[in-house]
Amino acid sequence: MSSELIDLNDLDLLADSGDESKDKTDIVDYKMVTFSLGGKDYGIDIMKVKEISKASKFTYVPNSIPFVKGVYNLRGDIISVIDLRLMFHLPVPENTTGIENMIILRLEENTIGVIVDTIDKVVGINSEKIQPPHPLFGDINIKFIKGIVENEEKLYIILDVESIFDQKAAENALAQKSYGTGSLASTSDTATGQPVVKQSSKDGNNVDYNFIVETLATFSHFFVSPINEGWVKNRFNSWSNQRASGGLSVQFNSAAEANEFLTGFASPNSGRFWEADYSAALSEILPDNESGTYNAWDVGCGKGEEAYSIAVCLKKKFGSKKIRIYANDSDLLNISTAPNLIFTKNSVPEMYDEWVTEGNNGWHFTSEIKDLILFEYHDVTNDNQFAPVDLIIARDILSYLTATDQQKLIEIFYEKLKPGGILIAGSNEVISGSGWEPFNKGRVPAYKKI
Amino acid sequence: MRVEYINPFVEAAFNILKEVVDSDIKRGELYLKSTSQPVLGVAAIVGLAGDVEGRVLFDMNEATALAIAGQMNGEELSAFDDLAKATITELANMITAQAVTKLHELGFTFDLTPPAIFTGENMEVTDAGVEALIVPIELSQGKMEINVAVRER
């Protein structure tokens, strides 16, 4: 008898320990309020949610950012209300009642209401089941995603509300700053510089030109040098006439004006996929090589459109070779979306049809193209470590570096290019100096290493 | 630095530090530094090899290191002794290991070397030919900089 008892106990023990390990992932230690946005399920940590409510009649605040719906009186407390769908560029369904579903968030510093499509329920999960966000998610910046979790066969994207609203503040600051990378200190510099210029206006035109050159550096971080002087001088003449006819001073009063001055400087198809004719023009001048590999370096690839365009262009021309494109940018926000760039079908010219495919979040390139490109967060003025390349694309990059860095970078380009390789600079940039042979066929100005 | 590598390191650092050191933790803006840089006083280093090569350096001053080690051990430490050193080394190991695990899930495989710790004043680190990603972290114990320098092989 006694032995039987022990056996039974042992069995119980075994069963217990089995249960325990199974239970571990079932223990609910994280609750989230779930809701839908644009047809997908999301969750927010319940600790951040003060309450949920239906609300209408938001008080519009003039001059606010588009996704700020307005302010709302929550039992005497005035809170700001943000439309998450507008903020994340998701479709907003038609709503005739005017009554919106609102989640009131309690953040560290303030209380905020966010409008969502529908509020679902509270879901309890084990926090160990939360998986890190995968860079595939397109419509919402990965920084805002705390993780993904599965519950009852539904996948929930958990939003990190603290970082979203923190981020917003940061972006505001950034937007103000991006007008002049020189920041406040240098703006005040120009303010004190202005009167001096006005006093010594003997040779007004020349002084104006110098002033423009200086403020371009301050406001737009654009540095005038032999590389772009030709364009700037031409533009200065048309600018002076344009401003004079409008009765305005030639000098810039704001960053917006400096940027207006630079209109037309950007190379064709900047910041979007290259049109077929541009791609063909580039393809025409690409030198062939005898090896089985073809390496290219895309300097300052931004969000990645340029790198993908190059990839397709090379794929078409050198399909049989092993192609490698090093694409880098020093803007972390831009480059982090590049490896999984999502776009709409109509933003891609027809010539790319063969290589784009539709995923859950939108259109993207197939891995056949993606795998050709290595996206890196990298500052070109630091060390550049990679194999010699056949092609360098640095459109409108040099002009935005200081004169010393421009020279340094041109030397790096020279060193990195294989003999006979070509450098594509911006359409309005001129590379001179020994070792470079201008090679202007058609629309794409190129320079060959000799 | 390859874009896919950035997030795992940032997240791992954040998760682990939050868990074992301080729940009130803030991350600064990430940035890139070129080759030569000063080290604050205590530096734990973990090497990486495999698909990439490079190292991760955890850099802080001695007071911060002591406070963190004290917090992790649940007692007040007065001198930066073997226990404190071992604790900081372990912290470096935990963070790097979690980042590498995350990267492994994304399909990148690499190995870690055992961590080592350097202490001293006026130190400087130079990586020939790699730029470093700096992840500044603010803890209530002080400031820590995680300095990731890796490159593709």
Image: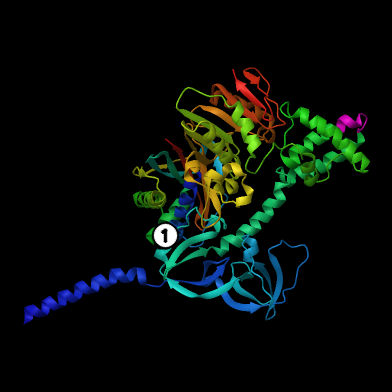
- Pointer 1 chain: B
Please, is residue A314 above or below residue A219 in the view? above
Does residue A202 belong to the magenta stretch? yes
Relative side of A306 to A372, left or right: right
Residue A105 location, quadrant? bottom right
Q: Secondary structure at mark 1?
A: helix
Q: Tell me the residue that label 1 is attached to.
A: B20
Indicate left or right for A249 with A128 as reference.
Answer: right
- Identify which amino acid the numbered label 1 is placed on: Val
User: Residue drawn at (44%, 73%), measured in percent from left and top?
Assistant: A124
Residue drawn at (39%, 40%) of the image: B51
Figure coloring: rainbow
**Start and end of the magenta stretch?**
A200-208
- Count residues near mark 1 (Cα–Cα under 10 Å), then give few for <14, some for 14-19, many for 20+: some
Dividing the picture into quadrants, the one containing residue A163 is bottom right
Residue B142 lies, in percent from the top left, at 51, 54
Which one is in front, B101 or A153?
Answer: A153
- In depth, the one of B11 and A67 nearer the eye is A67
Is residue A54 in the magenta section? no
